[in-house]
């Protein structure tokens, strides 16, 4: 259903460095980069995550209650991605664990303060 989600950044260079490392842990890479927006995904034609400065050139802010959840193949990948984010200085918002029988996830904040969930569904 979703094509992509964009997260605003006030320091795209730092954000790209963070997401290059964190998303590589789940096999994602940058598919498109126009200097302002940087799109990440696991394969062409699938949902992507975009990072960049706001179109209006204003200050990027994170939304209260806004949280993209990025699905991965297995619990080990959740653990690995979460560990890489924490290693890079991301504040933890909840260590990986089973939240309900069909959901295993970990939570952290990116360099711009966006809350991110990495999860395995099912």
Image (cartoon, rainbow, N blue to C red):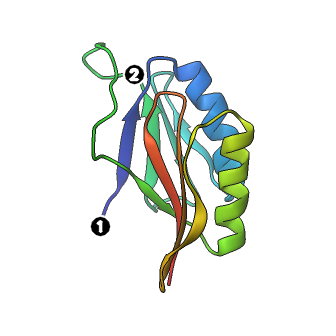
Foreground: 34 or 119? Answer: 119
Q: Where residue 51 sits: x, y (%)?
A: 46, 34
Number of callouts: 2
Question: Is residue 8 depicted above or below 104 in this figure?
Answer: above
* Dot 2 alpha-carbon crowd within 10 angstroms: few under 14, some 14 to 19, many 20 or more: many
Q: Where residue 80 sits: x, y (%)?
A: 73, 58
Mark number displayed over residue 1 = 1
Question: Is residue 116 depicted above or below 80 in this figure?
Answer: above
Residue positioned 28% across, 47% down in the render: 65
The quarter of the displayed image where residue 94 is located: bottom right
Foreground: 90 or 12? Answer: 90
Looking at the rendered structure, the secondary structure element under dot 2 is loop
Q: Where residue 114 sits: x, y (%)?
A: 43, 37
Foreground: 55 or 89? Answer: 89
* Dot 1 alpha-carbon crowd within 10 angstroms: few under 14, some 14 to 19, many 20 or more: few
Question: Is residue 100 depicted above or below 19 in this figure?
Answer: below
Mark number displayed over residue 99 = none
Residue positioned 66% across, 39% down in the render: 20
Q: Where residue 7 sits: x, y (%)?
A: 39, 36
Please tell me which of labels 1 and 2 falls first in the chain. Answer: 1
Looking at the rendered structure, the secondary structure element under dot 1 is loop
Mark number displayed over residue 53 = 2
Q: Is residue 69 left or right of residue 79?
A: left
């Amino acid at each position: 259903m979703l094509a992509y989600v964009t997260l605003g950044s006030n320091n795209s260079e730092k954000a790209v460095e963070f997401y290059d490392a964190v998303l590589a842990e789940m096999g994602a890479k940058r598919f498109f980069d126009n200097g302002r927006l940087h799109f990440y995904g696991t394969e062409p034609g699938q949902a992507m995550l975009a990072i960049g400065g706001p179109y209006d050139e204003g200050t990027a802010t994170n939304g209260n209650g806004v949280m993209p959840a990025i699905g991965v193949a297995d619990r080990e990948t959740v653990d690995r991605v979460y560990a890489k984010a924490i290693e890079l200085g991301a504040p933890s918002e909840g260590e990986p664990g089973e939240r309900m029988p069909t959901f295993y996830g970990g939570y952290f904040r990116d360099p711009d303060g966006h809350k991110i969930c990495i999860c395995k569904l099912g």
